[in-house]
Image: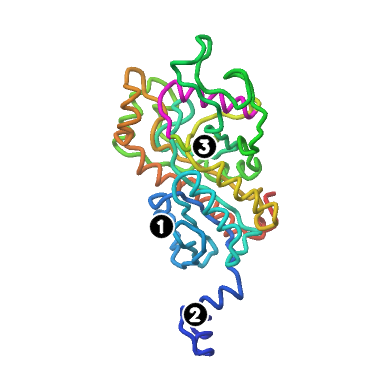
Amino acid sequence: MFTRNRLALALGLTLAAATQLASAAAPVTPKVMLITMFGPEAQNWIERLKLTEKVAVPGLSAEYPNVLCNAQQVCLMTTGMGQTNATASTLALALAPQLDLRKTYFVVAGIAGISPKHGTLGTAAWAHYLVEFGTQWELDSRDVPKNWPTGYLGINTKGPDEKPPLDYKTEVFELNPTLQAKAFALSRAVKLDESKESAAWRQHYPYAPANQPPVVTECDTLAGNTWFSGTRLSERAEVWTKLLTDNKGTYCTTQQEDNSTYEALLRASRLGRVDIQRLAVVRAGSDFDRPYPGYSEVDNLLKYADQGGFVPALENLYRAGNPLVQDIVSNWAAWENGVK
């Protein structure tokens, strides 16, 4: 800010005009760009990392028009919720002349539904595969053949258990496994938070890890604009993840945006604007994707807030993600040229 004040005095400009001129002359060069989807996901990062410097980027969400940065070159963007907002905001960010993102590490940090087979309320999971759930054919469950377990099937397939040809090119993405492993190693010992409500709710599940305290883990995330809930749809999510990853992936969290965010960054990467190998994704479970035995499938969806996982999940995104952020910033010489 001292430099911009001097520039304003020297040129007889307002501080705002000098700031704009300085930004045009020297693009912001973040070491880390945090990507959140809505205000509550962003708030802990903004407050604790003191992200107070605003960089207006045309094309971002009208609700979140600024990238927020600090003196340590950590920045944050909030895309707006859902696939359309994630795509539009991320591409606007990646192509913005105000930013030089060629060496930036991107960390998507958002809440998600979580499978009780692989986590609990508040669990933070680093993903290896991003799988798109919405890109399927669907028949009403009342109309499917009797030997089909679901009305979902891959596009241009003959049944639910056949892998589709992946014609859309966005159905499944593999993140950099070295970066994922590093992120997990830095955060695996972090103590995570839970609320009184979430600690009580997880006890309804008669098996681990659902009924255990939350921890940092590694498993994969499923994206789709339709917020699904229930045992049968969650079982389809498991099968679908296995199909699209050739049995390598393990479904554990469900959200809306991550394949959209990846595709936008991938297109920018092809232009040399970003490095797609510098993207990590962490999702924290705010609600279970299916009910405990004896609980209503409908209530699991309609009363999801009763589970008490929302606030702990927001906290745990910061606790799990910040060790990676701080390691990158503190040891930039080791990170600058890529993940070792």
Q: From the viewer's perspective, is residue 45 above or below residue 244?
A: below
**Rendered image: mark on residue 63:** 1
Q: What residue type is disc 3 on?
A: Ala
Q: Which residue is mark 2?
A: 17
Locate residue 270, reporting x and y percent: 70, 52
Residue highlighted by disc 3:
223
Q: Is residue 240 magenta?
A: yes
Marks 2 and 3 in Cβ contact (< 8 Å): no
For label 1, the SS is loop
Q: Secondary structure at mark 3?
A: strand
Residue at position x 39%, y 38% in the image: 286
Give the residue at x 49% y 64%. Answer: 69
* In front of the other: 191 or 175: 175
Q: Which residues are drawn in magenta?
A: 227-245
Q: Residue furthest top?
A: 146
Left/right placement of residue 51 relative to residue 198 reads right
Q: Is residue 133 above or below residue 336?
A: above
Horizontal side of 33 relative to 176 (left or right) equals left
Q: Residue 316 in the image: state x and y as whole percent.
A: 43, 44
- Type of the residue with mark 2: Ala
Is the residue marked by circle 3 packed among few (<14), some (14-19), or many (20+) residues within 10 Å? many
